[in-house]
Amino acid sequence: MDFEYSEQELELKNRVRRFAREKLLPIADRVDSVDDYSPEVIRLMADEGLFRYVAPKEYGGAGISSVSACIIREELSQVCTQADLSFIMSLFAGHAITEFGTEEQKGKYLPALASGEKVGTAAITEPGAGSDISAIETTATLEGDHYVLNGTKNFCSMGAAAEVCVIIATVDPSLEAKGLSAFITDCKNPQPGLKTEVMRLISPHPVYRIEFSNYRLPRENILGHEGQGFEVVLSILGRARPTVAAAAIGMALSAYEQSLDYVQKRVAFKRPIVRFQAIQLKLADMMTNIEAARWLTLRAAWTRDREDSEESMKQASMAKLFATEAAQRVIDEAVQIHGGYGLIRGSRVEYLYRTIRALRIYEGTSEIQRLTITRALVRTTDRSV
């Protein structure tokens, strides 16, 4: 297996890096300091053509590739969290519609996602259903030509911006996972029975609660068929998890670069602190963690682009587990290196310290990743391992 970037991938990496530093860096502190989504960031990314990577070529996109998505997320997350989230949430919707949508749905939604005209997302988590997807309680009851939705979704990133939101609900709670189904709806434009509300987290993040109260959705908005919702979720997670690892790597790199710059300028005992062995050991460990995480991530993305299997899911879980945990360690060391200055609210490493924490939870906690890995390794019919 060759994990080296192709010429096209290197060109993409350099282009996104330039874009992030020239267009996003001047506004990043401002847009990343608020909880609501940024139309300005979405417009800049649309103008740059980055949303083309959330849809197939035949629908105006550049093609969906886990490697390309990882490249984009690593570069964006080094500079601007808002941009990173805007991209990946649209990829969620674009991937789900590409894999499970009808030709009519693909023609209706994918070109709009690829152009950035519409933003996508997925709403899965509920107050009582996180890792246990089968516990989803949001109901979708068929009444004539409409499904009537009732329930609450939590932690929906970019929810209030999304005109293409993939909702997971149950058509029959007694069937548990087998009753789950996926639907496409518009959460941006106010409609009777649908309400969005910002959820305030430890770090600013455009994440929302979505409430459905007798919300009527046309029957043709079902994605796939009834009972296929669990499959849709697994497919989204299989595609998403390597990219979460890539986002973590980007944040860790940002912390490392901040630290490297700081230790060469900070003087203690009449010499730059980079000359102290204790600092040198920290820098070595930080970059080793970053490099190890990147290779696990590239392998997982490379495999996912070639197969959707238990093996690709295992590798995705390994990458997400190691990269997010490693990034937490790297950023913690960055704060330690900065000392008291690393605790000042508004400093880059302080922001990263708060922001990285969510990545060990969303798209499956570190504990869930370990269970997924173990089950794939054991390969038995006994799923109680």
Image (tube, rainbow, N blue to C red):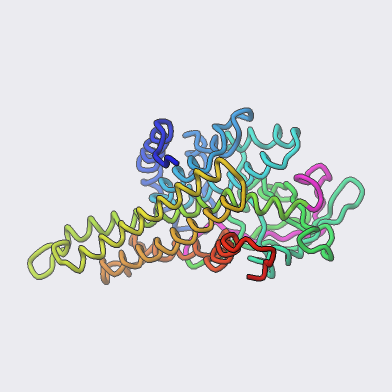
Q: How many marks?
A: 0
Residue 297 position (above or below residue 22) = below
For the residue pair 186 and 62, the one nearer the viewer reads as 62
* View extreme (left): residue: 270
State the residue at coordinates (9%, 64%).
271
Q: Quadrant of the C terminus?
A: bottom right
Q: In the figure, residue 29 lies in which quadrant?
A: bottom left
User: Is 336 left or right of 97, judged from the image as shown?
Assistant: left
Q: Is residue 50 visible?
A: yes
User: Is 71 left or right of 95, judged from the image as shown?
Assistant: left
State the residue at coordinates (58%, 55%).
157
For the residue pair 106 and 201, the one nearer the viewer reads as 106
State the residue at coordinates (71%, 50%).
190
In the rendered image, residue 153 lying in the magenta stretch gets the answer no
Q: Is residue 31 visible?
A: no
Residue 146 position (above or below residue 279) = above
Where does residue 114 sit, x and y in percent of width and height? 58, 35
Where does residue 158 sit, x and y in percent of width and height? 58, 52
Where does residue 21 sit, x and y in percent of width and height? 35, 43
Q: Which residues are magenta?
A: 203-227
Q: In the figure, residue 382 lies in which quadrant?
A: bottom right
Where does residue 210 sit, x and y in percent of width and height? 68, 59
User: Is 374 left or right of 254, judged from the image as shown?
Assistant: right
Residue 67 position (above or below residue 335) = above
In the rendered image, residue 208 lying in the magenta stretch gets the answer yes
State the residue at coordinates (76%, 51%).
228
Q: Quadrant of the N terminus?
A: top left
